[in-house]
Image: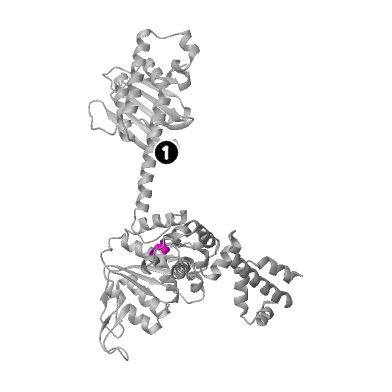
Amino acid sequence: MAKSNSGQERDGHLVELKPEDSRYLREDRLLASPPPMALMARDLAAFFRISNAIGEVQGLQPLKRRLLEVVGEVVPADSGAILLVGETPEQFDSVFGWRRRDENADSVPVQRELVTKALREREALLVRLREGRQAGSSVLCLPLTAVERMVGALYLATEPAGEPISEDQMQFLSAISGVLAVALENARNIEWLKNENRRLRRGSDIKHGMVGSSASMEKIYRFISKVAPTDSTVLIRGESGTGKELAARAIHLNSARSAKPFVAINCATLSEALLESELFGHEKGAFTGAVKQKRGKLEIANGGTVFLDELGDLALGHQAKLLRVLQESEFERVGGTSPIRVDIRLIAATNKSLEEAMSEGAFREDLYYRLNVVSFTAPPLRERIEDIPQLANHFAVKHGSKSNRRVLGISPEAEECLINYPWPGNVRELENAIERAVVMGSEEFIQPEDLPEHILETGTARGGYSPRYHAAIKQFRKDILLKALRGAGGNFTKAAKSLGIHPNYLHRLVTQLDLRGEVDQIGSS
């Protein structure tokens, strides 16, 4: 029941009421001391109005305003607020205010001490002020709880000249506080889901040439959607063939620089002298063969994006010049003396550990920190197996069109072989395998026999499908290798010599044919 404490405040009267003690929620008290019929009819009508208000509006902010307006029709409040708590009851995610005489008001003064007490003790508090300038005014603070979770508080206040809030009204609002709390919590959850959906859609709606819908690829799409609008330098790590350049192109394509050039340079394919000229350009006569001035790739890409692949192979001298470009946005051509200013975004990629290169003195530490502003790792194909069928079908149609041959996709048997192969060369190896299968095949769907032999053998060894002809060939090769290894006592070098092959190739064959367990037994016997 409500507790009255006139000594709680020096200048006021405090009434405390736990929600479960509201007479409308206690059948025994309601039957023992029923309120007048007129009061029950008024409260029932008010409950219907509040219920209808919850169903009339969508969105958290409109719901807060509508609830305060309808509660204001039931309770003679001159102002009110809904406070939603954050991670802890001491933090508030939002405070929405309402004034009866000002529809545009969205903030009102709130006694935080009273709100904190109501939330801490989980009970409604009604204060009627008797002295001072605010004598005659009243404040009701009501905790809002949904399934044991503290959602927030309802705060109502009257002015000194107005009608004060009564204990009957406190009883009614306390009884329906759970309804208000659930409505607000649901609206907040729906709003969060909508915002999260918009955020995810921003990641899914980016332009890119990549194929895959696995969780790891979705993570990359979201990363691209965040970094593309910025001008931050990006470092892409990952094994060869994982699509690092495609990711770099996607970042450029979704940036404000998309209308400007995207220039890609592979640092591992050119000699040190040629790479310097390719990057920075040269003046006429700078070296033998420099018969005319040449603009470098950095200059050509002005306003756009430069993609440096295999950055770990960049010579230390070139690293120093690249660092100057990042710090000063300028460089000089080979043989030149005048600085050239450029506005470029740099995206770098590497399949090497730059941290190891730094420890060995092969990579500049200052350049590393300038490059590693934001970074991600392109996942190897073996870590996104679910993307293999989609990639394979994409490449089949692509190369079928190039070869002027009708190819509709991959057969289930061939798909099983592809899924069971480890793909050390990643997506690049998969595309090459499918291109070969398109050229060698003759049916509308690629069959297992169209695939390269090593993929077929390894894929069928790990999977369940095995055509009779290929199964016989595979078993024959297994027998030859095991016989040689037994004769050499498990020594790979001796066994390879007897077979006339390199030991590294013998190791690779053992792995491809899934013989590692049998070979280990030979070595231990």
Identified by mark 1, the residue type is Gly
Q: Quadrant of the C terminus?
A: bottom right
Q: Which residues are magenta?
A: 394-398
Residue 10 appears in the figure: no
The percent position of residue 208, horizontal first and vertical second, equals 35, 60
The percent position of residue 168, horizontal first and vertical second, equals 38, 15
Magenta residues, dominant SS class: helix
On screen, residue 471 versus residue 120, left or right, reads right
Q: Is residue 395 magenta?
A: yes
Q: Is residue 147 magenta?
A: no
Please tell me which residue is depicted at 38% across the width and 69% down the height of the picture.
403
The percent position of residue 3, horizontal first and vertical second, equals 46, 17
Please tell me which residue is depicted at 44% across the width and 35% down the height of the picture.
89
Q: Secondary structure at mark 1?
A: loop
Q: Is residue 258 above or below residue 113?
A: below
- Quickly name the residue at label 1: 86
**Res. 191 image quadrant:** top left
Callout count: 1
